[in-house]
Image (cartoon, helix red, strand yellow):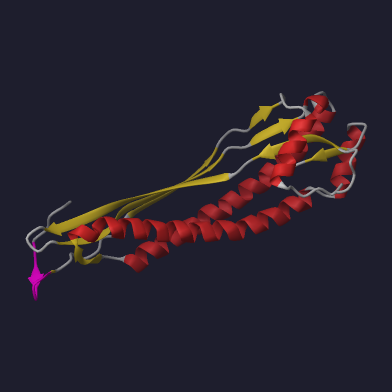
């Protein structure tokens, strides 16, 4: 809570003028981790749980050679500047800072059965193409989040005067509104991501890697 020269008009607290908050958008792309410990059957089971696109659909003799796990994780924190008039039971609120961290932590899995060169190298090269798409989507999301947060801050401005008892409810409601806007934008970008990943998973690409690995290879995303 902070104080400022208290002004009262018609029995209500007069809120101070708004001050632009500090906005921090922090993209974090962690180093790629590699896991060669899983068997092809394990990766196939994981693929079925995620219901990934497969250009070899209907071909039971394909084996899963590799896949990647790479999801954008977002955290949001808001710091408020709150002015109170305990005598009136009123408060004014405004954003002090908004911080968003967008994190990508890619893991490439190569099945034990395909973990020797040159097959391993072909599988890794393919999965890295998927990660490159993920990073492009992440960059687009970071830019979109920056725009969303600034718009939310500008639209909200100074809140009040409100009942001191209602301050926490306003915090919760405002936080959820920003989170929902971010979720909606992420959902739209995920469709773009799916389409771009499907282009990486072309039949020609799989045929090329299957030739290197001396047999049909399924590569998941």
Q: Is residue 15 left or right of residue 130?
A: left
Q: Nearer the viewer, residue 180 or 199?
A: 180
**Residue at (67% x, 48% y) in the render:** 133
> Residue 91, located in which quarter of the rendered image?
bottom left
Among all residues in the image, which is located at the extreme bottom?
10
Question: Is 10 part of what is drawn in magenta?
Answer: yes
> Residue 154, located in which quarter of the rendered image?
bottom left
Task: Point out residue 204 in the picture as x, y percentages from the top left corner.
Answer: 88, 47
The residues colored magenta run 6-12
Q: Is residue 71 left or right of residue 212?
A: left
**Residue at (86% x, 43% y) in the render:** 206
Among all residues in the image, which is located at the extreme left?
87
**Compared to 187, does 72 lie above or below?**
above
**Compared to 154, does 105 lie above or below?**
above
Task: Point out residue 143 in the picture as x, y percentages from the top left corner.
Answer: 52, 56
> Residue 191, located in which quarter of the rendered image?
bottom right
**Compared to 105, does 87 lie above or below?**
below
**Residue at (53% x, 45% y) in the render:** 73
Taking the image as drawn, is residue 166 in sight? yes
Quadrant assignment for the C terminus: top right
Task: Point out residue 84 in the picture as x, y percentages from the top left corner.
Answer: 14, 58
Numbered label tally = 0
Question: Is 18 part of what is drawn in magenta?
Answer: no
**Residue at (67% x, 54% y) in the render:** 193
Task: Point out residue 20 in the picture as x, y percentages from the top left corner.
Answer: 30, 59
Taking the image as drawn, is residue 221 in sight? no
Q: Nearer the viewer, residue 148 or 216?
A: 216
């Amino acid at each position: 809570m902070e104080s400022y020269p208290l002004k009262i008009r018609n029995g209500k607290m007069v809120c101070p003028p708004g001050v632009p908050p500090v906005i921090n958008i922090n993209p974090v792309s962690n180093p790629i981790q590699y896991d060669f410990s899983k068997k092809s059957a394990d990766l196939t089971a994981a693929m079925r749980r995620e219901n990934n696109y497969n250009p070899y659909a209907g071909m039971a003799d394909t084996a899963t050679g590799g896949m990647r796990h790479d999801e954008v994780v977002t955290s949001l924190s808001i710091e408020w500047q709150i002015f109170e008039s305990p005598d009136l039971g009123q408060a004014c609120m405004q954003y002090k800072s908004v911080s968003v961290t967008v994190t990508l932590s890619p893991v490439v899995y190569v099945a034990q059965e395909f973990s020797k060169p040159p097959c391993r190298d072909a599988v890794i090269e393919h999965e890295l193409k998927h990660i490159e798409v993920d990073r492009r989507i992440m960059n687009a999301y970071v830019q979109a989040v920056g725009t969303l947060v600034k718009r939310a801050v500008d639209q909200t401005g100074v809140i009040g005067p409100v009942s001191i008892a209602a301050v926490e409810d306003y915090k919760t409601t405002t936080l959820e509104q920003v989170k929902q806007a971010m979720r909606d934008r992420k959902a739209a970008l995920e469709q773009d991501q799916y389409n771009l990943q499907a282009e990486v998973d072309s039949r020609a690409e799989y045929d090329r890697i299957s030739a290197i690995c001396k047999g049909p290879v399924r590569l998941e995303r």
